[in-house]
Amino acid sequence: MTTEQQTRKPEKKANHYVHNDVLLPIIIDFRKRRDQAIAEGKPEPPMPNEIGKAILDIANGLAKRFNFRDYSYIDEMIGAGIRDCIGGVYSFNYEKYDKPYSYFNRICWWAFVGVIKEEKQEHAERTKLMLDPTVVGFDTLDADSDMNISRQELQDFFYNGK
């Protein structure tokens, strides 16, 4: 056995779940059929399942990335990514670009970031309301709840860590 054989690492099989060379012709065909149907006044054809599956795979794959996987509202992020990608199918410029995976991945990325910003802002507003002594909505809990925490105890917990 030579030293070259000893130091060579075995090749890893790529784990690509969406292939540009497969997805691009499907998008082009769908968009041409859609444009033709609109020009003829016919109803739009349904989006092919392959495009939907690719969008689902991209959104779920991106959700597993370390940037996003630990959020409790990951389902909302995935849903926003899918919603935005479906809209992006109609605006993808297949004459100029040939990488739909990158296009949809970037759409999902920004949809995820948008959901994180919205959730962060909503959390800040809820916390501000909860700690505001003039708001009475957080003074009482449901009648079924056995937890009775006074506003002072709540403020002590948040501000003083008691």
Image (cartoon, grey):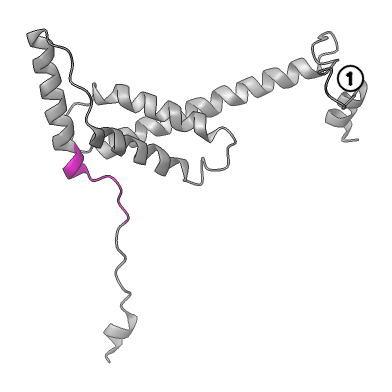
Residue farthest along the front direction in this orientation: 144
- Judging depth in this view, the residue of 105 and 57 nearest the camera is 57
The magenta stretch is 15-23
Locate residue 105: give its quadrant.
top left
Is residue 116 a member of the stretch shown in magenta?
no
Disc 1, SS: helix
Could you tell me residue 16's position as x and y percent? 30, 51
Quadrant of the snapshot with the N terminus: bottom left
Q: Which residue is denoted by mark 1 in the rendering?
A: 151
Q: Quadrant of the C terminus?
A: top right
Number of marks in picture: 1
Q: Quadrant of residue 72?
A: top right
Identify which residue is drawn at 68% across, 22% down.
124
**Residue at (35% x, 34% y) in the render:** 106
Q: Amino acid at mark 1?
A: Arg
Residue 114 in sight here? yes
Whether residue 81 sits left or right of residue 87 in the image: it is right
Residue 18: say if magenta: yes
Q: Is residue 65 left or right of residue 91?
A: right
Graded by Cα atoms within 10 Å as few (under 14), some (14 to 19) or many (20 or more), the crowding at tag 1 reads some
The spot of residue 44 in percent (x, y) is 18, 16
Q: x and y percent of residue 25 in the render? A: 13, 36
> Compared with residue 42, is residue 93 higher up or lower down, i.e. above or below?
below
Report whether 61 appears left or right of 140.
left
Asked whether residue 98 is in view, the answer is: no
Relative image position of residue 11 (x, y in whole percent): 29, 69
Left or right: 100 in relation to 129: left
Judged from this view, the residue extending furthest toward the bottom is: 1
Q: Is residue 87 above or below residue 1?
A: above
Residue that appears at 57% across and 42% down: 70
Query: In this orientation, which residue lies closer to the viewer: 11 or 3?
Result: 11
Q: Residue at x 30, y 48 (%)?
A: 17
